[in-house]
Image (tube, rainbow, N blue to C red):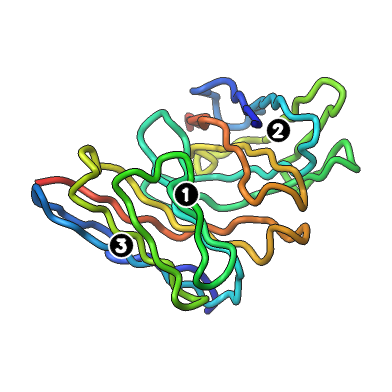
Amino acid sequence: GENVEQHPSTLSVQEGDSAVIKCTYSDSASNYFPWYKQELGKGPQLIIDIRSNVGEKKDQRIAVTLNKTAKHFSLHITETQPEDSAVYFCAAKESGGSYIPTFGRGTSLIVHP
Amino acid sequence: DGGITQSPKYLFRKEGQNVTLSCEQNLNHDAMYWYRQDPGQGLRLIYYSQIVNDFQKGDIAEGYSVSREKKESFPLTVTSAQKNPTAFYLCASSIDPSRYQETQYFGPGTRLLVL
């Protein structure tokens, strides 16, 4: 089955800095990669996703890059703000195949004012 | 407003007691899921359902049961057989994971505590 590794487990940055979270996956059949943000005491919210037919996707201050050859994908947050502080989860799934995505263990991002 | 609702927000269980967590969605999604979240362990799948009256075990189904009698509802029962139920429980839904519309949307969660 699929295995998703996420690093780092904790990331601390100063406001205005960039933050990068990396995930690797094992199943070359995976081709759908969502990222979720979870604030304390709340459910995860989808913030961006990417499919394997593109290498990069951007939405304002967040972007995701995908390297299918190396089987890794990354979340980039620029100009971080204190409200970006949360736990971020990556996931990988075979589109149209298994019904269940495989999640990484999460990264706790702390943005210091 | 469309979305997924979970109730209650907090739930307390006594020893030997079964408790039921509610999950309702008005998104007209076919598939629904239950996850358990423990600190530092990410999301672990308990049960999922692709259509009404059908459900499958996930990775950690022991001590839990579900039903899917209506498309909108997917309640989770934590039975007395679950010896370590203290966790944050998340319900999710997706339109149709078999047709490339697989994005999962999560509810706000229920925190279960043992007295």
Q: Which amino acid does label 3 sit on?
A: Leu
Q: Where is residue B111 in the image (x, y as percent from the top left)?
A: 28, 51
Name the amino acid, label 2: His
Whichever of callouts 3 and 1 sits on the residue coming sooner in the sequence is 3
Marks 3 and 1, how far apart in space?
17 Å
Image coordinates of residue B42 in percent, x first then y, are 47, 35
Badge nearest the viewer, 3 or 1: 1
Query: Gap in Å between the C-alphas at discs 1 and 2?
Result: 35 Å
Above-or-below relation of B29 to A49: below
Chain under callout 3: B
List the residue tagged with mark 2: A76
x, y (%) of residue B50? 59, 63
> Does residue A106 appear to the left or right of B24 in the view shown?
right
Give me the residue at 55% from left, 24% from top: A13
* Element on which disc 1 rests: strand
**With B26 as the anchor, is A75 left or right in this view?**
right
Q: How far apart are marks 2 and 3 (CA)?
A: 36 Å
Q: Which residue bears the numbered disc 3?
A: B21
Is the same chain shared between marks 1 and 2? no
Q: Whole-percent x and y of residue B89?
A: 36, 50
Q: Residue B57 got which mark?
A: 1
